[in-house]
Image (spheres, rainbow, N blue to C red):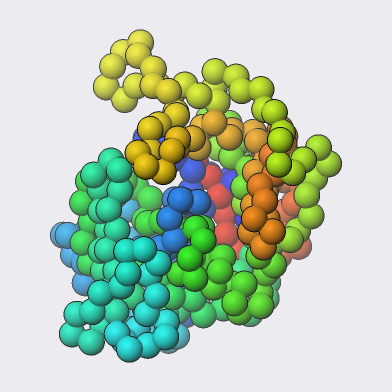
């Protein structure tokens, strides 16, 4: 399953994917995060506790024919770390991030419409009832967790026998573009696996300071006990291949915009309102 990076705007800078959830399908833009496992979007009952700027609005489980809440005793009540909670016999989650933002809400199951045109697949995700910090103010609707726990969308698709346990991510330039490839869709020539040396240019480690004219920040951070955190800008025009089943990561310099065009799947001829995931950059 291939996902193309196609959209960008000039507000806050982050890459995002468009996912299609529910019946009938609704489009939501989500930030792709390889460092966490929860996927979530604003819930209709969140009201003013969720931000006013989200592009896709809110998700109302009551208007989807395939939606169901996850009970506390359900085997689908899985959140990774931190573990799920329980409120009024409904499975709940909470997440906090280094920049002091947070998301919390309840777990629901509904279908995700895949970009390869196959039938929609039931997945479990968070329906937000509260946001704080940058998550509250961002224009993206939510987050797509690609981490290692069973709660991640990738692992749910793997468990449903929809994709192989691998994915690739290619972030484009400051204008966006590129690709997210779920499953084993083949690795382009020039991408090598363990001991690859990458030559990084200034665009791969410097970004403009939000509030300071003529100032720049380095996209490499101290991640406390977890070591060093490399920001997404480090991998602009670098294809990163995550072979999860073999615990290997491969890297290769490539033009992500061209890759996104080359791998566009046959289902791109279908109605984009009901299939697919697109990918882009917002500022």
The percent position of residue 120, horizontal first and vertical second, equals 58, 78
Judging depth in this view, the residue of 169 and 17 nearest the camera is 169
Name which quarter of the figure residue 250 lies in: top right
Judging depth in this view, the residue of 15 and 139 nearest the camera is 15
The percent position of residue 185, horizontal first and vertical second, equals 75, 58
Q: What's the residue at 51%, 80% (across, down)?
A: 122
Position of 135 compared to 30: left or right?
A: left
Name which quarter of the figure residue 71 lies in: bottom left
The percent position of residue 248, horizontal first and vertical second, equals 67, 51
The percent position of residue 270, horizontal first and vertical second, equals 67, 66
Say above or below: 215 vs 121. Answer: above
Find the residue positioned furthest to the top: 214
Position of 228 compared to 198: left or right?
A: left
Q: What's the residue at 32%, 53% (across, down)?
A: 54
Q: What's the residue at 56%, 69% (across, down)?
A: 155
Q: What's the residue at 69%, 59% (across, down)?
A: 246
Q: Looking at the rendering, in which quadrant would you find the N terminus?
A: bottom right
Say above or below: 49 vs 208. Answer: below
Q: Looking at the rendering, in which quadrant would you find the C terminus?
A: top left
Report if residue 77 is visible in the image: yes
Position of 107 compared to 194: left or right?
A: left
Judging depth in this view, the residue of 129 and 243 nearest the camera is 243
Say above or below: 145 vs 16. Answer: below
């Amino acid at each position: 399953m291939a996902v193309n990076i196609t959209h960008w705007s000039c507000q806050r800078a982050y890459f995002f994917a468009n996912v299609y959830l529910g019946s009938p399908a609704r489009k939501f833009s989500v930030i792709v995060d390889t460092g966490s496992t929860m996927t979530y979007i604003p819930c209709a009952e969140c009201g003013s506790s969720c931000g006013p700027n989200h592009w896709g609005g809110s998700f109302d489980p009551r208007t989807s024919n395939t939606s169901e809440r996850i009970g506390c005793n359900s085997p689908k009540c899985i959140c990774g770390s931190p573990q799920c909670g329980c409120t009024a016999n409904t499975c709940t989650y909470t997440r906090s991030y280094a920049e002091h933002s947070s998301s919390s809400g309840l777990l629901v199951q509904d279908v995700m419409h895949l970009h390869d045109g196959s039938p929609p697949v039931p997945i479990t995700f968070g329906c937000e009832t509260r946001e704080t910090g940058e998550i509250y103010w961002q224009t993206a609707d939510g987050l797509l967790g690609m981490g290692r726990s069973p709660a991640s969308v990738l692992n749910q698709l793997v468990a449903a026998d929809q994709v192989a346990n691998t994915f690739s991510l290619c972030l484009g330039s400051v204008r966006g573009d590129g690709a997210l490839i779920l499953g084993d869709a083949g690795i382009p020539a020039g991408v090598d696996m363990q001991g690859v040396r990458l030559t990084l240019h200034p665009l791969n480690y410097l970004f403009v300071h939000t509030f300071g004219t003529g100032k720049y920040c380095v996209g490499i951070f101290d991640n406390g006990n977890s070591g060093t955190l490399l920001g997404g800008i480090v991998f602009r025009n670098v294809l990163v291949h995550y072979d999860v089943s073999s615990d290997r990561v491969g890297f290769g310099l490539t033009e992500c915009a061209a890759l996104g065009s080359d791998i566009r799947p046959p289902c791109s001829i279908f109605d984009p309102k009901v299939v697919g995931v697109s990918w882009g950059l917002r500022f």
